[in-house]
Image: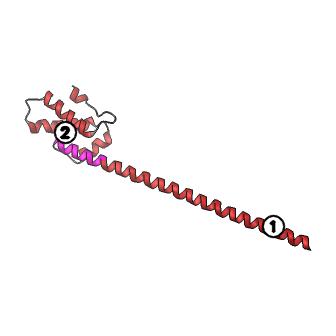
Amino acid sequence: MELRLRRRQPGETLSALHRDIRRLMALAHPSLPEEARDTIATDYYIDGLDDPDFALKIRERNPVFLDDALRISLQLEAWARDSKRNRDVANKTKVRSASFLSDNVDKRLTRIENHLQKCVESLANVAQLS
């Protein structure tokens, strides 16, 4: 029953889940041949991920053995982390670019305002002379 209900806890590594599933499987079915035990453990491991989308991606790759399921899940998790990091970097770059453009616009606007003020003062001086 513990094997069937085993789920990955928040912050738990995939390797820790893998080890625990292997341990529970050996305790629950000691008389099964190793290959059969490994195949059944693979299903329990995938179910234990407790993320249906992630589990589906692993099942689509059709792992036969528990070690295959671990390798696939580690690879997918690393790709997902890398993809998220790349999105975060791209978003930060966009924010910095927008900030830089905003600073340039402010500087240009200040220069234009100063130039306009000088023009107004010059016109006032010309008007006083006439």
Name the residue furthest top: 1
Q: Quadrant of the C terminus?
A: bottom right
* Residue ID at (10%, 39%): 35
Identified by mark 1, the residue type is Val
Which colour scheme appears in the figure? secondary structure
* Residue ID at (35%, 48%): 81
In this picture, residue 45 sits left or right of residue 88: left
| Residue 109, quarter of the rendered image | bottom right
* Residue ID at (52%, 56%): 96
Q: Quadrant of the N terminus?
A: top left
Q: Nearer the viewer, residue 53 or 128?
A: 128
Numbered range of the magenta stretch: 62-77
| Residue 12, quarter of the rendered image | top left
Residue to which mark 2 is pinned: 42
Q: Is residue 97 above or below residue 6?
A: below
Q: Residues within 10 Å of mark 2 (few under 14, many from 20)?
A: many
Estimate the x, y position of residue 112 in percent, counting from the top left: 70, 65
Q: Main secondary structure of the magenta part?
A: helix
* Residue ID at (77%, 65%): 117
Q: Are the residues flagged by discs 1 and 2 in contact, CB closer than 8 Å?
A: no
| Residue 56, quarter of the rendered image | top left
Report if residue 88 lies within the magenta region: no
Identified by mark 2, the residue type is Thr
Residue to which mark 1 is pinned: 120
